[in-house]
Amino acid sequence: MDQIPRDIELAVRAAAEDSKGYAGELPGVYRRARRRARRRVTAVASAFVVLAGLVGGGLVVRQRQAAYEPAVAPPAPAQRLILSGVAGEYEAPQNLPTPVRLGGNLQIGEVSADDHLITHSVVGGGSYDRSIGLPDGRLVSLGPRSGGAMLLTVQSLGGETQQRDIRQMAEPVALAAADAATAYLWRPHGLYAHDLAGGLERLVISSAMLDVSEADPGAALDAADVVGDRLIIAGKSRSCRPLLLGIDPPGGVRFLPLTSLGCSRVTDLRLSPSTNRLAVTYTKAAGGVRVAVLSTEDGAILADREVATASTCQVRIAWLNERVVRGVTVPPRSPEPQELSLFRIPT
Amino acid sequence: MVVPTAAPRSVSSSDPAVDGFEAFYRAHVDRIYRALAVTLRRDDLAHEAVDEAMARAYAKWPVVGSLDNPAGWVFRVGLNWATSFWRKLRRESPLPVDADHPVSDTTPTGALFMLAELPLPQRAVITCRVLLDLSTAETAEALGLTEGTVKSRLSRGLAVLRTQMSSEE
């Protein structure tokens, strides 16, 4: 049978006409094509740089052996290691006599590149759910205020502060990630890019496309991170199989499973600055918290180390550079000042 | 109105390749989008898929524009992109239904309801034949199938639709 009966043809055409109709525009297609071309160029250039680095690295090392090396401050980390959501009193890693109090309406902690615990007071006080440190020194924080407001605060090193109430109709909102120009927010309909300068928002990827709850996507995830045009999520329903996605344009890339490592739940995810690697903190059924590093190209496990023997410990991680993950293990809250334990994982 | 499948070639400009793509886009994008929306049963996914496929067509327009059925090529690229994404996410489970494109028999023909009963490969063949006006041979080429497979899927799909229409009557 090769011919389509007339009544069926009409029915199929009626189904097509029932659709809303295409709402896109040609410039959008051109922009998408340019982004694709740029990504290809960047990928080729990155491969070339890595190759050049491998070839030239030996020469550089030999030259430095005879050179004078002045004492300099450690280079700024690629990602800042912020201690948000760990309220309590802690012994400072640099052995200062006075414990450091974090959380409440006081201070947000940060472990500097030279392993010192420093603190930031966010103007306006209040209790921040989450803070993210930008490489330029700014701190992006989100937290509730009385009256039902949810304040997004951007505070510069000099104390200049910009605050904006971003709650919409009492809907849940959570801070997923931030970069120099954008804060990424989980709202019921999906992940939104919030322009830090003007406050405009656009939907990056919908909850339906991510297969997460449209009631509160942030709560349906164990962890998530955004770097560049890549999004990584660990949904509660498949926590140990984080999914890497592209967000510009949106699309699935690959799963990065940790099931072979005995993972029972992922607790944090950090993509490296180039998005070539993924650092994951996870708990095991038998207890303990571990940190694994995976290649985002093929899911290969590049490192896996236990950083806490108790699953109740919290672990925060950040990339020092493209190859080294540093982190801090925070013990469970206690009346006594707790000791933070720092670690680094080279790959 | 039946829109011709082949891209118009008579547009003149300082950059014929760009103008050729633009004419093709304007002539075909809505129809390919509707075909994908019916096949995928998701308006938002169909939108993303047609944009992605059009961007790829633009990037290699000298090649795509010279094909017999560029619209079929764009449909297949969009369909592969969308189903690949969902296959990764859902492990071959059925595609969800968009709330904006509900499967119900509230339309005069109940067409969406009937089409929803078909497996995606059969819907793809039928939408290629009906909405993109492709012949069996053109559908086979566009979807990367043999003509026999296209005929088989078409036959099974039409049989299901025929049964449903008879029971409605």
Image: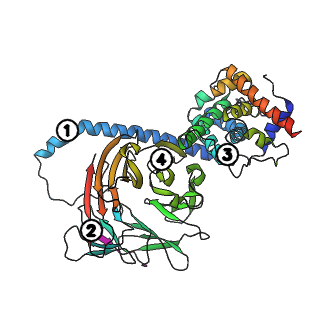
Chain part drawn in magenta? A116-125
Q: Quadrant of residue B16?
A: top right
Magenta highlight on residue A122: yes
- Tag 4 residue: A243
Q: Which mark is residue B42?
A: 3
Picture quadrant where residue B90 is located: top right
- Sequence-wise, which precedes: disc 2 or disc 1? 1
- CA separation in Å, label 3 and label 2: 50 Å
Which comes before the other along the chain, label 2 or label 4?
2
Residue at the spot x=63%, y=32% of the render?
B76
Query: Do the residues indicated by labels 2 and 4 lie within the same chain of the protein?
Result: yes
Q: Which residue is mark 1?
A: A58
Instruction: Give the number of the disc on residue A117.
Output: 2
Question: Is disc 3 in the same subunit as disc 2?
Answer: no
Residue A181 seen in the current view? no
The CA distance from mark 2 to mark 4 is 33 Å
The type of residue carrying mark 3 is Arg
Is residue A100 placed above or below A176 in the rendered structure? Answer: below
Lateral position of residue A179 relative to residue A88, left or right: right
Q: Are marks 3 and 2 in contact (CB under 8 Å)?
A: no
Dot 2 falls on a residue whose secondary structure is strand
What x and y, as percent, mark residue B35?
71, 38
Using residue B43 as the reference point, say whether residue A76 is left or right of it.
left
Whether residues under marks 4 and 1 lie with C-beta atoms below 8 angstroms apart, the answer is no
Image position, residue A310 (x, y; %):
31, 60
Q: Is residue A147 magenta?
A: no
- The kind of residue tagged 1 is Gly
Q: Residues within 10 Å of mark 2 (few under 14, many from 20)?
A: many
Location of the C terminus of chain A (image quadrant): top left
Say what secondary structure mark 3 lies in.
loop
Q: Could you say where residue B120 lies in the image, as x and y percent from the top left?
A: 67, 35
